[in-house]
Amino acid sequence: MKVQLLAIMPEPEALIARCARVSHRSEGTGPESDRKLIHRLIELGHDSVLEHAVATFEITGISRACANQLTRHRLANFVQESQRYVDVRDRTLVRPPSFSEDDWKKASRLCADAITLYEHLVARGVPKEDARFVVPIGAETQLVLTANFRELRHILRLRLTRSAQWEIRELARQMLRILLEHAPSVFGDLGGTP
Ligand SMILES: Cc1cc2nc3c(=O)[nH]c(=O)nc-3n(C[C@H](O)[C@H](O)[C@H](O)COP(=O)(O)OP(=O)(O)OC[C@H]3O[C@@H](n4cnc5c(N)ncnc54)[C@H](O)[C@@H]3O)c2cc1C
């Protein structure tokens, strides 16, 4: 899995604080006062101000199973690699940590057989959108996610918990690591992954 930040609003904490100050016409006095203000906003649940800052991630090497969960987040925007148009014969399987070596050998064999069948179908003239039906849900995919900070906090809160599936939890950890570099006041309270 690889998570890369494609874009983020410049100085997102200063921007959020500036937006928040519009509501009570106060003046900011620098990053420390911005941080305090952002903590207060989050404490009070005045989360809508966080919507003014946005980030875009490119995510590669996650399974379709993981992507299916991620794309349930309706307030985020996605572009996902299309199995209708892209030839997916070079896609590898994501290995779940619970698989033993033996499980993994069997799963890899099954995936190789599925890809052979995929190639055979495409060669016979079956459209890729139909041939993809034999590709396993554990096969790698890639997507781009754009979301505002309020939605990113929501996604991370849900997906960092122990009850979330291991792969999306790892994805959330990687996203959080990146976001903490850019906006620690906004995402800092999510750091203590249980
Ligand atoms: C541990 C875990 C287990 C899960 N298990 C299952 C499962 O078994 N089956 C399954 O189908 N899904 C499952 N899900 C997915 C879950 O039901 C949600 O679809 C997913 O987490 C997206 O959450 P959301 O709707 O809060 O977020 P988003 O779609 O990101 O929306 C963010 C917030 O915006 C608001 N919002 C968005 N759209 C609306 C709307 N139309 N009306 C009102 N408010 C709205 C809500 O406050 C929402 O929380 C699971 C999720 C988790 C984290």
Image: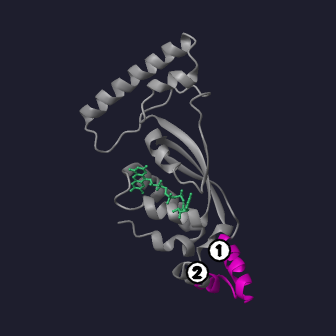
Assess whether residue 18 is covered by the magenta stretch. yes
- Res. 49 mark: 1
Q: Position of residue 121 (x, y in %)?
A: 51, 14
Counting from the top left corner in percent of width and height, residue 127 is at 58, 19
**Element at badge 1?**
helix
Q: Position of residue 73 (x, y in %)?
A: 53, 54
Main SS, magenta region, reads helix
The kind of residue on which mark 2 rests is Leu
Q: Residue at x 70, y 66 (%)?
A: 10
Would you say residue 89 is visible in this rendering? no
Tell me if label 1 and label 2 are in contact, CB under 8 Å.
Answer: yes
**Relative to 62, residue 56 above or below:** below
Q: What residue is rendered at 62% in x and 27% in y? A: 85
Residue type highlighted by circle 1: Val
Q: Which residue is mark 2?
A: 41
Q: Which residues are magenta?
A: 12-36
Q: Is mark 1 within 8 Å of ligand 1?
A: no
Q: Does residue 126 lie above or below 66 as drawn?
A: above
Q: Quadrant of residue 170?
A: bottom left
Q: Residue at x 72, y 79 (%)?
A: 18
Mark 2 residue element: helix
